[in-house]
Amino acid sequence: MNLNGNEIEDNTSNNHFEPKIDFPVTYILKVVVDVNHPGSNPEILVKELLKQQQIAYRWVGEKKSGKNNFQSYSIEITLISRESMQRLYSGLKTIKSVKLAI
């Protein structure tokens, strides 16, 4: 499922493809934000979302783009179910400065 809530499709057939994920799963979440978006502090908003959803996380780092227009956050998270993954990505969509989360 991508950030827009759309299913990921397997281009080799007309069937929807959803990879098998064994939960709980721990991985590095990458979140890319627009640093020029007015009126928000995306780092705080992302951390608050993770805390609100009771998702275990460890802030790994952050990196600015070459032209300083975007910043990416690397966050190690542990998700306990597919539903918690869907809630996380739905929550990230509500943060206007978030451009991409993988």
Image (tube, rainbow, N blue to C red):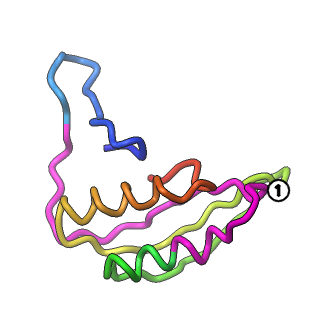
On screen, residue 15 versus residue 41, left or right, reads left
In this view, the residue in front, 50 or 58, is 50
**Picture quadrant of residue 61:** bottom right
Q: Residues within 10 Å of mark 1 (few under 14, many from 20)?
A: few
Image coordinates of residue 48 in percent, x first then y, are 49, 79
* Quarter placement of the N terminus: top left
In the rendered image, the residue lying farthest to the front is 39
| Residue 74 part of the magenta segment | no
| Residue 27 part of the magenta segment | yes
**Picture quadrant of residue 80:** bottom left
Instruction: Identify the residue at image location x=14%, y=62%.
Output: 22
Does residue 13 sit above or below 24 in this rendering?
above
Instruction: Identify the residue at image location x=68%, y=67%.
Output: 40
Instruction: Identify the residue at image location x=40%, y=82%.
Output: 51
Instruction: Identify the residue at image location x=74%, y=59%.
Output: 35
Image coordinates of residue 28 in percent, x first then y, are 43, 66
Image coordinates of residue 79 in percent, x first then y, are 26, 70
In the rendered image, the residue lying farthest to the right is 67
Image coordinates of residue 59 in percent, x first then y, are 52, 80
Total tally of numbered discs in the picture: 1
Span highlighted in magenta in the image: 18-46
Q: Amino acid at mark 1?
A: Asn
In this view, the residue in front, 12 or 32, is 32
Q: Which secondary structure, mark 1? A: loop
On screen, residue 92 versus residue 64, left or right, reads left
On screen, residue 38 versus residue 101, left or right, reads right
On screen, residue 97 versus residue 89, left or right, reads right
Q: Which residue is mark 1?
A: 68
